[in-house]
Image (spheres, rainbow, N blue to C red):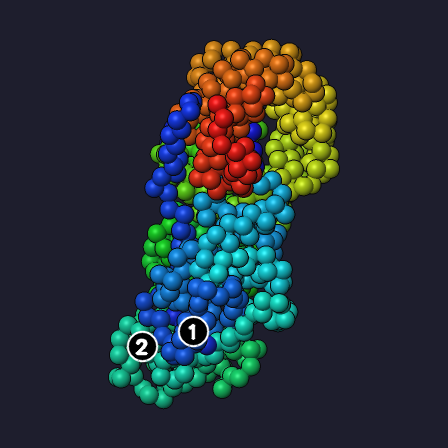
Amino acid sequence: MNDDTPEPRQVRSTIGGDVGGTAIQAGAVGRDVNVTNVLKGKDHRPLQVERPPHDFVNRHDPLEWIGSTLSSGSSPRVVLCEGPLGIGKTTFIRKIAEIHQDYFSGGQLGFEYRRGLYEDPDTAITGFLRALGMERNSIPNTPAERAKEYRSLTRRRPCLLVVVEGAWEPAQVRALVPEGNGSLVLVSSDVPDLDELLGDPRGAHPHSLVPLDPEHARALLESRAARSLESEDPEAIERLLEVCAGLPLAIALVGGRLCRMGLGSATTLAEDMERAPSAPDSAEELRRSLGVIFETSYRALSPEAAAVYRALGDWPGPHLDRALMPLLGDEGRWEEILAANLVEMDTHTLRFRHELIRGHARDRAEEDGAGRRRARLTAMLDAYLVRLGFAELAARGERLRTLDLGSILTGAEDPFDGDTGLAKAWLLRERPTLLSVVLGSAEQGLHVHAHRFAELAPALYLDHRFVHDWATTAVVGADSARMVGDTAAEAGLLSLGSRPLTDLGRHAEAGARLDRAAELVEGMDDLMLRASVLEFRGRHLAETDPEAAIDAYDRCIEANRASDLPGSERGEALGLLFRGQARVRAGQAEAAVADIEAALTRFEGLSESDDRMSARGRVWLGEAHAAAGRHREAITALNLAIEGLGARDQHYYRAEAYVLLADLYEEIGASGEARARLVEAERLYRDLESPRAAAVAERITRSGPTRD
């Protein structure tokens, strides 16, 4: 996947002011080529599956059965871990990953489908390719090619564990099955629709998880109560265990209550749960039993803590950044909810222990009334927007934005202190929340929030290419901007959003949205935005209609030249560079050389030189010279590009330059030089886990031994 995304442009307005686990039971190169690994020290063995809780309890049989299915010489196996919500499937899977960590030498991958969000297997596959070491520019452009590369990559990785949670369609599982021998797919299933997997040629194996037996249930209850239960009323303990029905989630909640209430509290707690059904033996009865426990735990909270619980239920994301917690209540209120085991917390975030608890909290939030809920959610979204704004600023720097980021951040303290690495780590961690806040804001009619979140979210997507997330947020954000009449925001989201739509093969939709964006900016005084939209339109047309692309770049360059805003000089340089690339495709080689050389001159004249785009521009200059038949000039340009790209670790583009050099050397009959460049390119592509490595290797084989 070639990423021709330009470096950030200058922002139009400068920033002023003081901106400051549930425990469970289971059921350049001469002839002598010296190549080093560009990713030396990088660990391609992902370990994405979380550890189980310390007090995991279970019978031995289920774990032994899973262990017996592991064989490094066998074809991949799929196991459906079945059972109702709350039975502990997730923690069982985590325990398997922990016990057999040494066996899974290929690594551990995990993905959770979330209902209500547009997620298909391609989202998971894209993430898996990155986790397995594939450099983002190496990832193929289309879902079909990405799926094929996932199969190829995993075939070379035996003993890989893939965990799939939340799937509701068989296709969501099938697409993620790896090809390597000895691999295992563990699927957490509570829907009957996945039964179709049992009839697959590879044959999925079902394994039902059952409730804890009395002995293990009591052991877990005692662990969560953090004391011996010998001094409690035996009948009360039995009643509590009966209500919990062997469900680890229920036992964890009840144990948390006992811990908080102290010695002698079992009788009182059992009386609080007197409405619970006895001896539940069906999934619906188990769900009702959990509902009683949720409600009992909720009603035991202080009014202030209960209000915090309800507020958390309205938050659209799957977790809450801990920095937002003070907005909802003081530390004591959170300690109450944590002690009740309704939520869990790690270093960075807080979340409900289970989606069933989230549902309960959302239901209870209705007690607060629409007005209060909306005001509360708006305050939380405002605070989150500030954190996202600082992260986006650190990740992308000063660039063209349609929103006034300065007014949003003024007076706030930067939680990342301008550290790009910290900001990017936060963005990656917040990926599911970014999508949720865009969709949730739009659903609640908070359209200004929706389009602002959508404009800032590409700080993550440009790095990691979560194209489904990106496409969804861009579409929803543009619609929200239109709803509130923010034409500039709509145009910006329409144009930038064309990138993921193109990657998804939705070319007609991307073209239509770019046409709409071009219409919106046609009469605008905002020349920088107009230039940006025209640039994106030109890049979209470059492959299919280079003449139309050249026309778009003409207008882009004109708009940048007419502007005196910061960034316009760089915008002109980019327009010239891309127009030169389009002219190569249109057969206008001499004009292309002139454009690219002019662009490089402008890059060098910027107040802050852009070595990255200059190096990449020299690759295109080499192409243009080659198209014009000037081999010596082309070779010089490409060697300069290789040197510059190597200094900036742009190894994917270095590999492309080596292939172009090989083409040129073959044309002039220097087969030895051509082969040396191909060897370099193949090593680079292989280190980057690029599918192009195989094609280059085949070309090296066909070239035969060196003859010069």
Closer to viewer: mark 2 or mark 1:
1
x and y percentages locating residue 155 in the rendered image:
51, 54
596 or 299: nearer the viewer: 596
- Residue at (36, 74) in percent of width and height: 57
Three-letter code for the amino acid on which mark 2 is drawn: Glu
> Which residue is disc 2 drawn over?
222
For disc 1, the marked residue is 68
**Crowding near pointer 1: few (<14 within 10 Å), some, many (20+)?**
few
Q: Is residue 228 above or below residue 633?
A: below
Pinpoint residue 400: horizontal percent, then vertical percent.
Answer: 54, 25
Q: Residue 96, how many percent across, how many down? A: 40, 67
Residue at position x 47%, y 79% in the image: 210
User: Element at badge 2?
Assistant: helix
Relative height, residue 96 to residue 545 (above, below): below
Kind of residue sitting beneath label 1: Ser
Mark 2 and mark 1: Cα distance apart in space? 31 Å
Judge by depth and name the residue closer to the eye, 451 or 201: 201
